[in-house]
Amino acid sequence: MHDIKIGTLISADKVESVMPKLISYGFETFSITFWKTLGGCDLVKLADSVKRILADTDCTISSIGLYGNPLVNTEEGSQANEGLKQLIDCASLFGTDLVAGFAGRLPDRPVEESVPKFQEVFAPLAQRAGEKGLKIAFENCNMDGDWNRGSYNIAFSPAAWELMFEAVPYDNVGLQWEPCHQMVQLVDPIPQLRKWVKKIFNVHGKDATIAWDIVKEQGICGKEKFVWHRTPGFGDSNWTDIISILRMNGYTGSIDIEGFHDPVYKGDLEYTGQVYALNYLKKCRGGEFVTL
């Protein structure tokens, strides 16, 4: 039953201190992440550390990702672009074939106005990745933006995905998808998953709880909060259905838990929640493999 593995996200600066402690709980994959830029990280040295930590285990690195905005003409934007190039060049050192991140955005402009710059930046990155047998996946987080304005990422809407994949029409370009980022927009993730599953290269294990009573009484622009990000097992999604749809469509990637968002399982309860989610998702996957 390990055709879909269950793991967690881990910040690059926490690899040495956290990854060894998590292995014993049964995490099967790790997705290594950078925020905005590589921050001067020596990727070869980091890869050596990862190899040492994962030696004699069955754990693997599912992806390495940089979550910044490579479309802006700023120093940070240039560093994000360069960082993605470095991740592509070093991905094989981590034993992964997937580089992930945001699609970027021209700040506070409608989505379609970012597409030419997206094409300019990511067409050569996709080619660079393809030459090395790698894939690129865009997380579907709106970063508090909408169609008309935002700061980091256009890859949050199916209408945007259509524009993106038309502008950069490569088979190795797809999505790093999670139901939570759709649910906060009041989108039902299941129909979307069925339609877009072939473009999904990695799944983030993050759920949401929607307070429909608040939506019905006060709407989504009122004083009361109406949706919360949740760790899998504590939200509204049926992960058995999600995993079944993935499996029925030949998905053999991983589901990597994205923690540090749950309003209850946080602080001292963070890893209690993550380990619960790990075991919950393994059960949704079908439990222990049985052969006769």
Image (tube, helix red, strand yellow):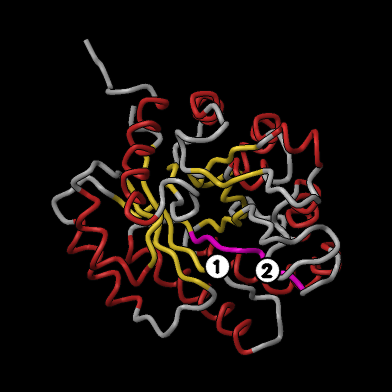
Q: Quadrant of residue 73?
A: bottom right
Q: Is residue 177 left or right of residue 16?
A: right
Q: Quadrant of residue 45?
A: bottom left
Indicate yes or no whether the magenta region holds residue 105: yes
* Residue 206's disc number: none
Instruction: Report the residue marked by disc 1.
Output: 67
Q: Position of residue 40 (x, y in %)?
A: 41, 85
The span from disc 1 to disc 2 (Cα, nearest Å) is 9 Å
Q: Is residue 129 magenta?
A: no
Residue of label 2: 152
Residue positioned 47% across, 56% down in the render: 98
- Tell which of 108 and 286 is nearer to you: 108
Residue at figure coordinates x 44%, y 72% from the top left: 89
Name the spot of residue 102 as percent of width and height, x first: 61, 63
Residue density around tag 1, few if under 14, some if 14–19, many if 20 or more, within 10 Å? many
**Three-letter amino acid code at the position of disc 1:** Tyr
Give the quadrant of the N terminus. Answer: top left
Residue drawn at the location 39% of the way across and 62% of the way down: 32
- What secondary structure predominates along the stretch shown in magenta? loop
Q: Is residue 163 left or right of residue 287?
A: right
Q: Which residues are magenta?
A: 99-106
